[in-house]
Image (cartoon, helix red, strand yellow):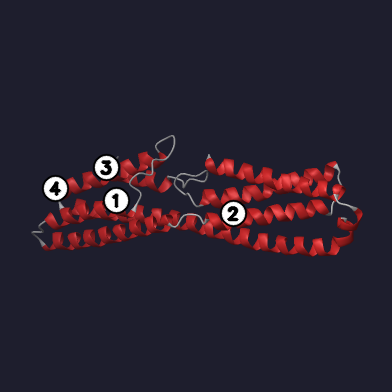
Amino acid sequence: MDSILFAVGVAVLAFAAGMLGLKLHVWLPEKHAPDRAREMIGAMTGMLSLLLALVLGTLVGSAYTVYATQKAELETLAARTLQLDSSLEAFGPEAQPGRDGLRKAITQSYNRIWGGGGADLSGMDVKSVVAGSKILDQFLMSLTPKTDAQKQVLATANAAANQIEQTRVLMMLQLAGGISWPLLAIVVCWSLLLFCGYGLVSPVNATVVTALALGAIAVASALLIIIELSRPYSGLFRLPPGAMIETLQALGS
């Protein structure tokens, strides 16, 4: 909701900057009339347009990279979880508590994020991940293989557990970066200057006002996309739960 309010505020400010430019076009005295500086204003708005396009494109691409990376790592995490469960099953009845704990942890994670309503992101930090990894490691260390087959599946389980831990820590570290709000503030300032410049060299009519409104909405929607893609577990574009659902079904939950 805060991102939507931010985007609406940017749209309103950009439109207001454009309307200010239209008013200045009428109010300025003859010697400062925009028509006398049309080439300079056009050059400056062109430069701002280029800067805005480059930075917005880069930010959208970076935000989508975070989103796509989290999706890929979530699918990898699901695959490693199934591998670990399979190894524990092959080990024997002694490993059943570990399978139950694994199933419970996956179910709780699914319910917190996709269970309905707003996502509960508590526990999605490096400290919590490390604490959970220690519990899993201690359980695996408590298993005592009695046959060569058990030794082999325990080694496979340890390898899967290590990969799960590394993937989870990496996912949390990537999310910890967040959004560069100072950079977004600079982009907003460029947008206001650009819309004011457009208003300075444009006549006052309904078509121009409509174009300013649509342009303001376009810039605001780009900023909304950047913010929401940077929140893959709680934003408007929340990651699809398909991988988690398939994992839970395979685990028998």
Residue type at mark 3? Answer: Lys
Query: Which structural element holds mark 4?
Result: helix
Q: Which residue is mark 2?
A: 185
Disc 3 to disc 4, C-alpha distance: 17 Å
Which residue lies at the image location 22% right of the left edge and 45% below the top edge?
101
Disc 2 to disc 1, C-alpha distance: 32 Å
Residue type at mark 4? Answer: Pro
Disc 1 to disc 3, C-alpha distance: 16 Å
Q: Nearer the viewer, mark 2 or mark 4?
A: 2
Q: Nearer the viewer, residue 108 or 195?
A: 195
- Asked if disc 2 and disc 3 are in contact, CB closer than 8 Å, the reply is no
Label whose residue precedes the other's in the sequence (2 or 1): 1
Residue type at mark 2? Answer: Ala
Label 4: few (<14), some or many (≥20) within 10 Å?
few
Label whose residue precedes the other's in the sequence (1 or 3): 3
> For residue 42, which quarter of the picture?
bottom right
Q: Which residue is mark 1?
A: 128
> Residue 188 appears at what percent x and percent y?
64, 53
Label 2: few (<14), some or many (≥20) within 10 Å?
few
> Residue 91 appears at what percent x and percent y?
16, 54
Label whose residue precedes the other's in the sequence (2 or 4): 4
Q: Nearer the viewer, mark 1 or mark 3?
A: 1
Disc 4 to disc 1, C-alpha distance: 28 Å
In this rendering, is residue 163 above or below 253?
below
- Asked if disc 3 and disc 4 are in contact, CB closer than 8 Å, the reply is no
> Residue 166 appears at what percent x and percent y?
32, 61
Q: Nearer the viewer, mark 2 or mark 1?
A: 2
Q: Nearer the viewer, residue 202 or 253?
A: 202
Residue type at mark 1? Answer: Ser
- The residue at the far top in this view is 117
Label whose residue precedes the other's in the sequence (2 or 3): 3
Query: Which structural element holds mark 3?
Result: helix
